[in-house]
Amino acid sequence: MFVLLNFLAVLAFILMLTVPALTEGNVTCSGTAMDWYTSQVGETACKTYERLRQICNSDFEVGVMSNTFPPDTCDEQISDCCCNSIAYALAMLCLNCQQNIGGGSGYDAPAGDYQLYLQGSRINSTCSPVQNQTLSTSIQTAVCNEEIKLFDSLYSLFWTDGSWYYMYTEQSISKAIASNNNNTFTHCASTTLNGTSTSSSGSSSSASSNLTSSHSSNLSGGAIGGIVVGAIVGVVATALLMWFCWWKRKEGRKATKPENKIEPFAQGEGRDRRGNYSTEVQAKSR
């Protein structure tokens, strides 16, 4: 029983350490090379990309980005969230995040790669409609409602031949951060420091409201991890309670065994009526 309890305790400790990492999946960076992005946005580029895609598909999860290009593809049936240059730039930033190459020259994309991203598994066609340097009105509204931080530079940077360059993107964003005093997310009132917005999007449409409500209803990775850890703690607590009850019963049986009882010494035992020891007692004392 003691061995079982030790095993459960060790198992619970291991799960408490590993669950947070498991729930993060592929959205973590493999190093510190892209801390310039994370420190400003509050999350990795992979997490931003995943949140943007989840507006249209709440089940979307970032996988391991391909370094043979394109890093990912826009294969969604409702493709508004990925059929744009901003989502593609985030996918490229995510590739650099996963590979931790951003500290050097980074991964650049060759000409035509953006078109391959838009095509995905389609034959001789791409997702539609394609949005370059902007998002559709409904997706932009959903982005603002979800408070997804998209650098202003991601809206302006675009290469018509379908290429993409890491160092130019990083340096452009870094310059914008310095020149605008960190106020570099101005396409949403929710992410603009002075509370104003340069976006022309109005109130949320019913379609985007449905999309964002379905997304927000899903459990986050941290919530799932908390449920798992709570379940493990419950199992361990139950096992400890069962062991305590078993130990108490064992001790109770041990205390009531006949050989453990001490009979009291009766007053005058071994003497006759005159106060002399009986013959049997005398015989034993010799």
Image (cartoon, grey):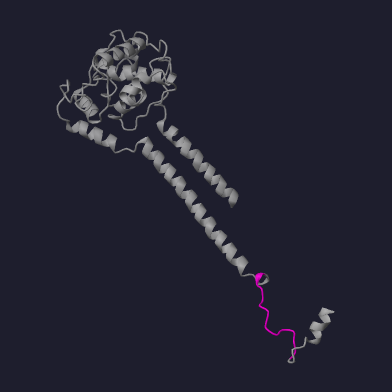
Residue 74 position in % (x across, y down) = 32, 21
Q: Which residue is more in the foreground, 286 or 102?
A: 286
Residue placed at 54% from the left, 56% from the top? 243
- Position of 195 relative to 168 (above/below): below
Left or right: 198, with 27 as reference point: left
Q: Which residue is more in the foreground, 41 or 4?
A: 41
- Position of 214 relative to 143 (above/below): below
- Whether residue 72 is visible: no
For residue 201, which quarter of the picture?
Answer: top left
Q: Which residue is more in the foreground, 259 or 70?
A: 259
- Whether residue 221 is visible: yes
Residue 262 position in % (x across, y down) = 66, 73
Residue 246 position in % (x across, y down) = 55, 59
Residue placed at 29% from the left, 38% from the top? 217
For residue 117, which quarter of the picture?
Answer: top left
The stretch in magenta equals 260-272
Q: Residue furthest front?
A: 275
Q: Residue furthest right?
A: 286
